[in-house]
């Protein structure tokens, strides 16, 4: 994963061109705008797609940005499913654009009341070379939006995602869609470096060289338990978009939607298996199924039995990996925290082993491969510990979002 420091040119451009109306909520910040400046001026796209207009803060900024280098040769196509600003229904969607410029700029086409699933039929074969997704943040909506991006945007293009760390920066907004998509993307991605250790809230993923590869990556993200159920017409539209590329992938999507769109039960958890916690201590928390509810594992002192959560007797049932979508270290931990994930076969043989060191409270998405082509049950061990040199275990815990399989 790459990271972009904020350039001097970005700071100068933001100082002159970034504006935000007092009535706007949820808009990009100057930091976010700096990231867009540095990435877009590096790539210099000519046809940009924006999904999610809202107040129009980002739309106005992007219009100014592409004019600064495109000189009329770059164009922004902005879409929003609503005709009005989501936070204030008496304000037109994108109202700040006209407030900022007096009229719509010539390098902007504003499309209101158009959902992301309708974009492919609206553009009719037109190809974008950059996209910015900042619409509904509840999972799986950003990934559903991405399917339309994949269909209408050239392979290898960059897709910027806003609010990738929103749940961790603003706990009143537990919307994990951008976070799951960014952290779980298996291809190239880039985020931002901000002085002072400030956590960035924007990043970008790069589409693969083929639509099939990008769709497969999107399907892996869709396997995470959905925060919002999708209407039947949305599922049908997404299926139609995928089927233009691959019948098999469209069928895979319908299978994922059938599991995820009925309350979020995890298919692998339904295949049996036991949950066992060894090295239990008073600070660990396991309240209900870890497939459905968050849990906390606290390390034990050096020399004691390690704290391990085991998923035993599981049937892979065609799944390819077990995923921990968001693992976060306690911000008050006195030392590094070690996490080890081990996949074992029925005879105890180690099939996959992965170790990660948590040195700060930045959330991580982790995955371990599952055996393919085997009907034998498996076991997944999740162990939390501290380094041998640690003398204290204050705050030595990791918080896990519910586990899922894809």
Image (cartoon, grey):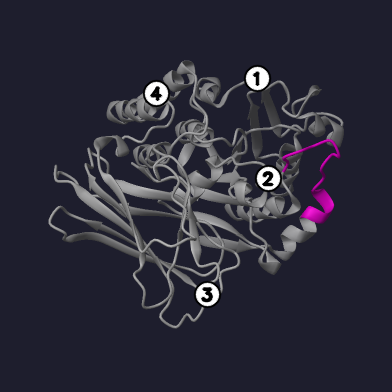
Badge 4 density bin: few <14, some 14–19, many ≥20, Cα 10 Å: many
Query: What secondary structure is found at the residue carrying circle 3?
Result: loop
Query: What secondary structure is found at the residue carrying circle 2?
Result: helix
SS assignment for the magenta stretch, majority: loop
> What residue occupies the far top of the structure in this picture?
233
Mark closer to the chain start, 4 or 3: 4
Query: What secondary structure is found at the residue carrying circle 4?
Result: helix
Badge 3 density bin: few <14, some 14–19, many ≥20, Cα 10 Å: some
The residue beneath circle 3 is 335
Q: Nearer the viewer, mark 1 or mark 2?
A: 1
Question: Mark 2 near mark 3, Cβ–Cβ under 8 Å?
Answer: no
Q: CA gap, disc 4 to disc 2?
A: 36 Å
The residue beneath circle 2 is 70
The residue beneath circle 1 is 113
Q: CA gap, disc 2 to disc 3?
A: 49 Å
Magenta-span inclusion, residue 16: yes
- The image position of residue 341, as x and y in percent, is 33, 60
Magenta-span inclusion, residue 185: no
> What's drawn in magenta, residue-wise?
14-27
Q: CA gap, disc 1 to disc 2?
A: 28 Å
The residue beneath circle 4 is 239
Q: The C terminus lies in which quarter of the figure? A: top left
Q: Which one is nearer the viewer's eye here, 389 or 191?
A: 389
Mark closer to the chain start, 4 or 2: 2
């Amino acid at each position: 994963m790459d990271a972009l420091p904020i350039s001097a040119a970005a700071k100068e451009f933001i100082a002159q061109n970034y504006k935000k109306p007092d009535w706007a909520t949820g808009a990009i910040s100057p930091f976010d705008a700096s990231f867009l400046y540095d990435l877009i001026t590096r790539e210099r796209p000519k046809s940009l797609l924006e999904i999610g207009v809202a107040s129009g803060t980002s739309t106005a900024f992007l219009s100014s940005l592409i004019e600064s280098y495109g000189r009329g040769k770059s164009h922004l196509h902005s879409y929003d499913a609503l005709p009005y600003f989501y936070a204030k229904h008496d304000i037109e969607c994108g109202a700040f654009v006209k407030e900022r410029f007096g009229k719509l700029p010539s390098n902007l086409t504003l499309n209101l009341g158009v959902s992301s699933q309708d974009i492919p039929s609206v553009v009719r074969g037109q190809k974008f070379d950059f996209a910015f997704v900042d619409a509904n943040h509840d999972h799986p909506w950003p990934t559903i939006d991405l399917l339309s991006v994949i269909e209408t945007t050239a392979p290898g293009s960059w897709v910027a995602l806003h609010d990738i760390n929103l749940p961790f920066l603003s706990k009143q907004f537990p919307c994990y869609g951008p976070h799951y998509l960014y952290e779980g993307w298996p291809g190239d991605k880039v985020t931002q470096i901000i002085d002072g250790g400030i956590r960035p809230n924007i990043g970008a993923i790069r589409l693969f060289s083929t639509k099939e590869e990008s769709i497969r990556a999107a399907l892996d993200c869709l396997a995470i338990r959905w925060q919002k159920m999708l209407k039947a017409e949305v599922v049908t539209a997404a299926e139609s978009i995928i089927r233009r590329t691959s019948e098999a992938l469209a069928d895979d999507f319908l299978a994922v939607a059938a599991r995820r769109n009925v309350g979020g039960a995890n298919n692998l958890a339904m295949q049996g298996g036991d949950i066992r916690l060894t090295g239990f201590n008073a600070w660990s928390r396991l309240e209900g199924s870890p497939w459905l509810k968050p849990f906390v594992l606290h390390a034990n002192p050096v020399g004691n039995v390690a704290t391990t959560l085991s998923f035993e007797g599981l049937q892979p049932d065609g799944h390819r990996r077990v995923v921990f979508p968001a693992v976060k270290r306690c911000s008050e931990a006195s030392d590094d925290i070690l996490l080890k994930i081990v996949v074992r076969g029925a005879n105890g043989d180690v099939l996959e082993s992965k170790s990660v060191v948590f040195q700060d409270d930045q959330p991580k998405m982790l995955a371990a491969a599952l055996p393919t082509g085997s009907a034998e049950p498996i076991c997944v061990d999740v162990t939390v510990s501290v380094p041998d040199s640690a003398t204290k275990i204050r705050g030595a815990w990791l918080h896990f979002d519910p586990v899922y399989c894809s």
